[in-house]
Amino acid sequence: RRICRDPTSHQPLAYLRLRSAIRNVVEQRAIEPGQALPSERDLSQALKLSRVTVRKAIAGLVEEGLLTQRHGAGTFIAERIVKPMSRLSSFTEDLRDRGLHPRSEFFERSVGEVTPEEAMAMNLSPGTLVARLHRVRYGQDEPLAIERSVVPASVLPDPTVVRDSLYEVLESLGCRPRRALQRLRAVSLGVQHARQLHVATGSAGLNIERRSFLDDGRVVEFTCSWYRGDIYDFVAELHAD
Ligand code: 16G
């Protein structure tokens, strides 16, 4: 607490006051997500605060994920993506439903022998061939998640046929997952993941593991993802019984 205060005035520092004022405005939806914040200059003139103070308040809120800055375009109220947890949907479908353009950038699309860890997770015997996909997932050219997927090569012999949607390819092969188990954990993003997702090292992320099954009980996918915590909300409907 003490370090947040200006010792001479016994008042919170101006940038902290402005930061919480902007936070209130956003939380009360006085400015809708996606809309622009007034410019730094307009804010400083209207509020009689220095540009440095305004800039510092905004920088803090950008770091919190409440505001986003687009180069040359200004500062905007961040839009969050709300994803229902009970639907077995794909990244591509989720984004298209929101009118956002999905895209993948691949680090890897290869076939190899299953690792012991993958074999355990997927209930495969040692030596089984699997297809691996490692990619950054974008929406409107903004990186949103990193995903590593493993699929038995008996299902997906050639992973290079996956351009955008893995589930679309699985569907065309008659192997679209029918049910899945998913685990979600809070993580702070390490240097490499943070860089790939264009956020600061240590930012909040969601590590999600999904194991998907076919009707006959075979595992069709084991995916480990890192979703951006500053963008995603995962919601679920709950029943009393
Ligand atoms: C989602 C799934 C992931 C799946 C991918 C397929 C979560 C947490 N993960 O990202 O398991 O592999 O969708 O998406 O929802 P695609 O069909 O667009 O490749």
Image (cartoon, rainbow, N blue to C red):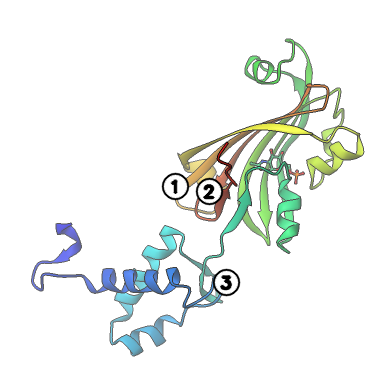
In the picture of the structure, the residue carrying the numbered disc 1 is: 201
In the picture of the structure, the residue carrying the numbered disc 3 is: 34
Image-based side of 65 in relation to 127, left or right: left
Give how far across and how far down residue 51 sits, in percent: 33, 80
Kindly indicate the quadrant of the structure image that contains residue 62.
bottom left
Disc 2/disc 1 C-alpha distance (Å): 7 Å
Q: Residue furthest top?
A: 126
Quadrant housing the N terminus: bottom left
Q: Earlier in the sequence, mark 3 or mark 2?
A: 3
Kindly indicate the quadrant of the structure image that contains residue 41.
bottom left
Q: Earlier in the sequence, mark 1 or mark 3?
A: 3
Mark 2 nearby-residue class (10 Å; few <14, some 14–19, many ≥20): few
In the picture of the structure, the residue carrying the numbered disc 2 is: 195
The one nearer the camera, 73 or 151, is 151
Give how far across and how far down residue 180 sits, in percent: 70, 32
Disc 2 secondary structure class: helix
Give how far across and how far down residue 83 sits, in percent: 62, 51
Residue type beneath disc 3 = Gly
Q: Earlier in the sequence, mark 2 or mark 1?
A: 2
Q: Residue at x 42, y 59 (%)?
A: 63
Q: Is residue 93 above or below residue 72?
A: above
Give how far across and how far down residue 217 sits, in percent: 78, 21
Disc 1 secondary structure class: loop
Q: Is residue 21 above or below residue 140?
A: below
Mark 1 nearby-residue class (10 Å; few <14, some 14–19, many ≥20): some
Image-based side of 182 in relation to 217, left or right: left
Q: Residue at x 79, y 21 (%)?
A: 218
Q: Is residue 118 above or below residue 96?
A: above
Q: Can residue 117 be seen at all in this image of the molecule? A: yes
Q: Residue at x 66, y 42 (%)?
A: 86
